[in-house]
Image: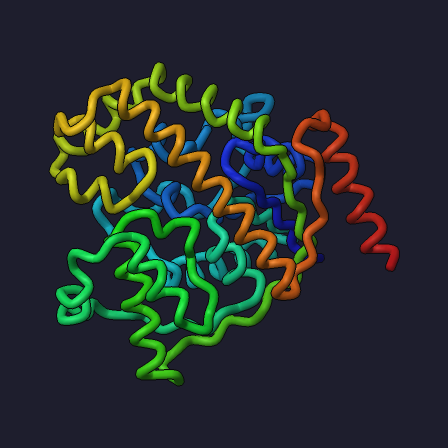
Amino acid sequence: MQMITILGPTASGKTSLAVATACAINAEIISADSRQVYRRMDIGTGKDLAEYAVNGSIVPHHLINICEPGEKYNLFRFQHDFHTAYDNIRSRGKRPVLCGGSGLYLEAALKGYSLPEVPANHSLREELKGKTISELADILSTYKTPHNTTDVDTPQRAIRAIEIEEYIKARPTASQDYPPTPSIVIGIQIDREQRRQRIGQRLRERLEAGMVDEARRLMDSGLTADDLIYYGLEYKFLALHITNRISLAEMTVQLETAICQFAKRQMTWFRGMERRGIPIRWLDALLPLEDKVRIIQNILKQTNHD
């Protein structure tokens, strides 16, 4: 019973499709999102938890709300947690549905990367301190293995990625092996203009839902502005606004642009996955939800027949 993977850029409708598919085939969802693991970071990470409620029941989902804000969740931990959830779901005779937009997390689950648990390298961090995102990205591009360029949108995250690569280079055997996970991979395709409109609309809805207040509560609970900036995207710009470095209007415009750029990087990563040997069957985001679910069910039937 192969896993189903549903991927796509932000605001493409991944969660709703994963939930509808899970309901149709009695499956459980595993999240592949590097930020939705954090509790109380709901609006800014786009958890859309209400979408998991169907006809009075909650569709079973895993790897959401498993960490406290301030922790540094990483790919090593994700791989361990993914395989624990995957084995648990399979042991109960159900099919896992992996869903997310974090390219490296998705690819690690599908291809079974070998990764070490990497400690902090303070001397390297000091050496890289002060470099721009562009300079750090250039350094990352010199390594042979794929990198989470979709999520490397702050210097801290880029430096951490370099730190991991340096550790692996010095200790090529210091890793834990995970097997590849057989999966049917479904991608949601949406054209740039539609994607931009959805991103803008969703951002306005999140601001109206209290995204700024959510970030303020996180800072009131003990997180610093730098802690929030580490998580990138929404929380980076929210922290800048709350600390009076940019106005609400400036934050909204800059954040919408940053999310659109993030979505473009996501699509670049997914195309790279195809080049690296992961076939993706693309569905039009504008198709009715029931049609997308029916197509996935037909793919499953064909796969079982083959």
Q: Residue at x 50, y 53 (%)?
A: 103
Q: Residue furthest top?
A: 208
Compared to residue 25, the image places residue 54 above or below, namely: above
Compared to residue 145, the image places residue 213 above or below, namely: above
Q: Position of residue 44 (x, y in %)?
A: 34, 31
Q: Is any part of residue 301 visible from this angle?
A: yes
Quarter where residue 28 is shown: top right
Picture quarter with the N terminus: bottom right
| 146 on left or right of 117 | right
Quarter where residue 143 is shown: bottom left
Q: Residue furthest right?
A: 305
Q: How is the image coloured?
A: rainbow
Q: Residue at x 31, y 38 (%)?
A: 39
Compared to residue 223, the image places residue 139 above or below, namely: below
| 292 on left or right of 165 | right
Q: Position of residue 234 (x, y in %)?
A: 32, 33
Q: Position of residue 280 (x, y in %)?
A: 68, 52
Picture quarter with the C terminus: bottom right
Q: Position of residue 169 (x, y in %)?
A: 35, 80
Q: Residue at x 65, y 38 (%)?
A: 189
Closer to the camera in the image, 255 or 53:
255
How many numbered marks, from 0 up?
0
Q: Is any part of residue 91 visible from this angle?
A: no
Q: Residue at x 38, y 36 (%)?
A: 258
